[in-house]
Amino acid sequence: MKHLWIELLLLCVCLSRFSSTASSPDRSREFGEAKNYEGSSDLVDLQYHMGPVLASPINVYIIWYGQWYQNQQATIRDFIYSLSAPSSSASYPSVADWWRTVRLYTDQTGSNITRDIALSGEFYDFKYSHGDPHALPLNPHNGLYLVLTSADVQVQDFCRAVCGFHYFTFPTIVGVTVPYAWVGYSGMQCPGICAYPFAWPKYSGRPPPSTNGGNDIMKPPNGDVGADGMISVIGHELAEVSSNPLVNAWYAGDDPTAPTEIADLCLGVYGSGGGGGYVGAVNKDSWGSGYNFNGVKGRKYLVQWVWNPVSRRCYGPNALD
């Protein structure tokens, strides 16, 4: 049995400079003149470049790097479970309904991205191993590795240029090519960038959530700014790694090293009318917690929209039209 941990961790640290696959906290997209394409199909030239998509059932393996609280892990696990949950497990609009838009993307054989996503394994590295070998199985057939770094872990370009990214391993290092994604916990380092709209960016001129007197910042639906902020970034990266796992399938632009992918096109859009720092029409509960999709076990999540290749617009199942 081969082990993947050394290669994944090192690649995550080294490859975070690839903003092409990043969920970038580009300030112009969230405040001021946002580049959102909700209803603007003439501005987008999304093309298929003949590469594979993840059409086979996906086995997700989570690497919990650093110190994590159980409630944070439960929020993220339940999101993964929600992606392919039956309609009886979560009311409409659900996370699984959101994934149906991702599933519209096909490969050159006409096969759609899979609806079957299973959490197949977890590894806990609370000792910050920095690449010590561990027994994490390598699944070269339908494995997808999700590296999640905790609040006290610093990753190159995190908060400055990226909130997360996806890429793939190199056969010369691992022996096979497998897709992976990395997302960092931003609750301590940059909540106003990577966990917006649950915290105000420092440059916005708005008070932080802890300021006496309060403010109208949206509250996180699961009670943790960092974990709830990660959910949308995880969704972003899962949508893009599924539709462009080897960076040669679905993206806009001529340069595969700097592609604009299906979630990049809708960054900051969570509901109808979203853009320019406004998340769009989303729900709020009696506590002021914002969400747009339902998950398993009564969970609520706020997840950004993705580009719909059929209607050629940003779309989510909570759309008003």
Image (spheres, rainbow, N blue to C red):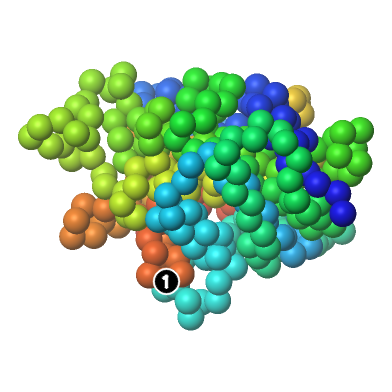
**Residue 208 falls in which quadrant of the image?**
top left
x then y, percent, for residue 93: 43, 66
Vertical side of 236 occupied by 108: above or below: below
| Disc 1: which residue | 297
- In front here: 311 or 15? 15
Exactly how many numbered labels are in the figure? 1
- The spot of residue 32 in percent (x, y) is 36, 24
Q: Residue at x 55, y 65 (%)?
A: 81
The image shows residue 252, relative to residue 229, as above or below, that is above
In the image: residue 246, left or right of residue 252:
right
Residue 33 percent coordinates (x, y): 40, 24
Q: Nearer the viewer, residue 44 or 118?
A: 118
Tell me, yes or no, if residue 205 can be seen here: yes
Q: Quadrant of residue 175?
A: top right
Relative depth, front residue between 11 and 46 = 11
Whether residue 42 is visible to the viewer of this picture, yes or no, is no
Residue found at x 87% / y 34%: 173
Name the quadrant of the C terminus: bottom left
Q: Is residue 225 left or right of residue 22?
A: left
Which quarter of the figure is the N terminus placed in? Answer: bottom right
x, y (%) of residue 268? 43, 38
Amino acid type of the residue that numbered disc 1 sits on in the rendered structure? Lys
Q: In terms of secondary structure, where does tag 1 sit?
A: helix
